[in-house]
Image: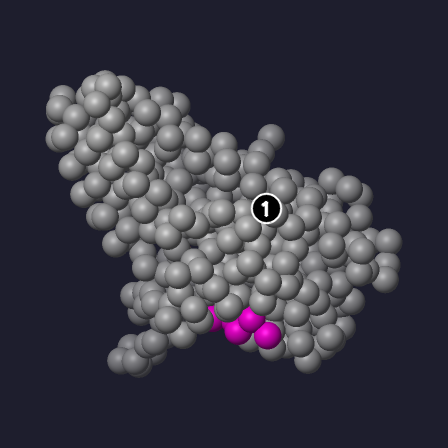
Amino acid sequence: MTLEAVRYRRGSLQILNQLLLPQRSLYLHISSVRDGWRAIREMQVRGAPAIAIVGSLSLAVELHGGKPRDKEGLATFALESLDYLVTARPTAVNMARAARELSDFVASEVKRPDSTAESFKENLISRIEAMLEKDISDNRSIGSHGAKHILSAAKTEKVIILTHCNTGSLATAGYGTALGVIRSLWSMGRLEHVYCTETRPYNQGARLTAYELVHEKIPATLIADSMVSMAMKEKGISAVVVGADRIVANGDTANKIGTYQLAIAARHHGIPFYVAGPSTSCDPALESGEQIVIEERPGEELTDVNGVRLAAPGIGVWNPAFDVTPHGLITAGIITEFGVHDPRELRKVLAEKACFKR
Ligand code: MRU
């Protein structure tokens, strides 16, 4: 049985509270945009695609069950809600992209002379629901493209993959991005082993990726982030595959803190380094990674574990949640639903696929 991080049916949204995993599987009801914003900010749901999906679905459920409004009132409510949802977390681009696309849709629907409040609501909700399906199918394509590419370069029948943070069913609408590539390799019978990092300071690897790998019975070993160079030297790693929170025009990629040092270590050891993410994680409006706003999280995420203080009282804390890997270190390619691209070619691919209207 696959993990169900998001349970949605028209008018009802529940999310698996990721702060409680792996000890407890508890679903949270999200019935408003405010609930969605809070779940994102507090990281009850996290992972770039999942943030956009849950944020947008929170709007869908509030539209469905909310107070009656005329067409203009609905449009104003939708636009204000989308702007608000974008403020929950700044680095992952997916919610901002979804907000922009949905805002464009709202603007065109509201202008249609034949649309009514009812049809407007129905069409906007359907449009949001389609994002859920699209993310899963994009992830399956990413999995398949990535697996084939890794195998075409592999010197062995089975491969060993190192990954970072959580990029699986819990971080997406389902299947996963980097973890989708791992899932594909496993289903092809070509995966020997996975090494997943603990992902300090918030332990998404130890809590969530390890949970997903155990759930899927994929052979895997947890390592501390400080062990990656040693693992690359000694464990026969075939490739490193990580996710993305924002991939900009030149291929520079923001992802979970620690990704940058992984890429440097992979380069040193001659190990192919891949970034996997759907086009919804791409932001060609930014030219280079220097322009990405990096979220800084509360110090307690570093000093405490499950509410218990480990660090010496009084010490200062710096807690950037993401870092930027320069495109030159993404040596093997960026995997999207369209294929595996040289980072320098990404801009062209996205333009060809007409992913970005503006
Ligand atoms: O802070 P988080 O847990 O939201 O960070 C998640 C990551 O950095 C993931 O690697 C990224 O969002 C890709 S998820 C498919």
The furthest residue to the front: 113
Q: SS for tag 1?
A: loop
User: Could you tell whether 78 is left or right of 180 in the image?
Assistant: left
Viewer-closest of 110 and 289: 110
Magenta-span inclusion, residue 101: no
Residue 326 falls inside the magenta stretch:
yes
Residue 341 vs 72, above or below: the answer is below
| Residue in front for this viewpoint, 346 or 196 | 346
Where is residue 204? Give x, y as percent.
48, 56
Query: In the rendered image, which quarter is residue 223 located in?
Result: bottom right
Where is residue 90? Give x, y as percent: 32, 59
Q: Residue at x 56, y 41 (%)?
A: 138
Judge whether 298 appears above or below 28 on screen: below
Q: Is residue 291 above or below residue 352?
A: below
Instruction: Indicate yes or no: mark 1 CB to ligand 1 under 8 Å.
Output: no
What is the x, y in percent for residue 130? 44, 31
Left or right of 84, for residue 284: right
**What's the amino acid at mark 1?**
Glu
Region of the chain picked out in magenta, as a range: 324-328
- Is residue 184 visible from the viewing direction of this image? yes
User: Which residue position is annotated with label 1?
Assistant: 337
Neighbours of disc 1 within 10 Å: few (<14), some (14-19), many (20+): many
Image-based side of 257 in relation to 82, left or right = right
Viewer-proximal residue among 1 and 10? 10
Which residue is depicted at the point 68% across and 80% down? 268
The residue located at (29%, 77%) in the rendering is 313
Q: Residue 347 at x, y = what percent? A: 52, 60
